[in-house]
Image (cartoon, helix red, strand yellow):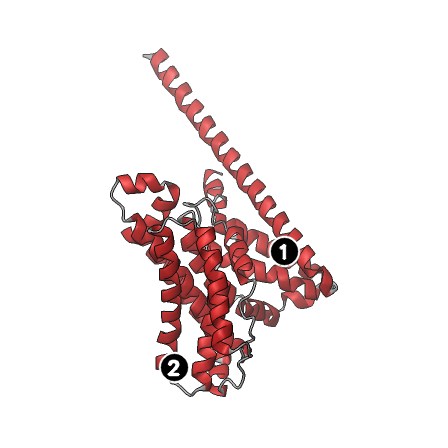
Amino acid sequence: MPFLIRVLKARELSIVLFLAGFFILVGSINKEFITGDTIALLIKSSAILLVMAIGQSFVLLTANIDVSVGSTMGLSAAVTGVLLTDGYSLWLIVPAVLLTGVIVGLLNGLGIAYGKIPSIIMTLGMLGIIRGTMLLFTEGMWIEDIPNFYKELSGAALLGISLPVWIAIVLVVVCHLYITRTKSGCCFYAVGDNEEGAVSVGLPVKRVLVLSFIFSSVSASIAALLFVMNIGFVPNQTGSGMELQVIAAAVLGGVSLTGGIGSVIGAGLGAVFFTVISNSLVYLKIPAYYNDAISGFLLLAIVVGDSQFQTYIRKQSARIIRNGQKGENKGERQTTTIT
């Protein structure tokens, strides 16, 4: 029993359990929802949100927030589209797009870490600046005629798994190992848990803050590369509203808005779950104009349900510990009496 309690306390496992339960529920109404092809399609369609949620989790862990990721994705997608249509090589395009993310993240990080600007204000201002820059860069036009070779990469597969999903998996693994197995990675938790305490023990708090926003923006740039690959064109509103979905996905995956709690694996699972919730309504044959309201209700219900589940598990764990301590004290009293 104690082992089971310890396992169930893992936030990632609870998300998996809720996800499995949701699949079973919707699948009982429409069996097409639980077919292998549908599940594979849902996972592939969640890759973009998953990549962005990974980057956002670094910022949230430091008790900050980045609402500029949607516009960063849009600008990066525009850069990708323009360079592709102009005939540049991928060896130039990929670094140029990633550099776009680095620059945006660096500006955000410097303003927050050194300028002492609240993250919500800084990134909200950058959202408008970046969106305006994208429209000026594209002259408000859609970017079409993406070369076929690039669009075909979306269908490339290894071991039955498509390239976008492989990229997302690799990023999850690398970021998880970095943030849990390295000293610099653990600093993100320390800064979010107690920034003043982190400063007092000599941690490079300002550098950690800047890095967190760079990671967030670079993840948005990687998502842009995947977006152009999947969609095959770049609308002038690419990424608009994505920041809210990214934050919701990370929070759904257990990353705390107050900092210091969560994991990139949880954020990734939250992105998958968020995508499943959004797409399940199609299989439930619910009219499209109900989608936002129902998706929001399901998201709140799942977050509240998971919170209650975790509270129950913590209470059970505390009860087991108390019972164990009572047993030890009783044994000690018996030993003393015999002596």
Give 51 or 85, whichever is nearer the viewer: 85
Give 221 or 272, whichever is nearer the viewer: 221
Residue in the image at 24% along x and 43% along y: 202
Image vertical order of residue 296 relative to residue 99, above or below? above
Residue 188 x, y percent position in the rendering: 35, 50
Quadrant of the image for the C terminus? top left
Quarter of the figure with residue 31:
bottom right
The secondary element bearing badge 2 is classed as helix
Residue holding disc 2 = 90
Question: Which of labels 2 and 1 is toward the front?
Answer: 2
Distance between mark 2 and mark 1 Cα atoms: 40 Å
Dot 1 surroundings within 10 Å: few (below 14), some, or many (20 or more)? some
Residue holding disc 1 = 22
Q: Is residue 329 left or right of residue 50?
A: left
Mark 2–mark 1 CB contact (< 8 Å): no
Residue 79 x, y percent position in the rendering: 44, 76
| Amino acid found under the numbered disc labelled 1 | Phe
Is residue 226 visible to us here? no
Q: Tell me the tag on residue 82.
A: none
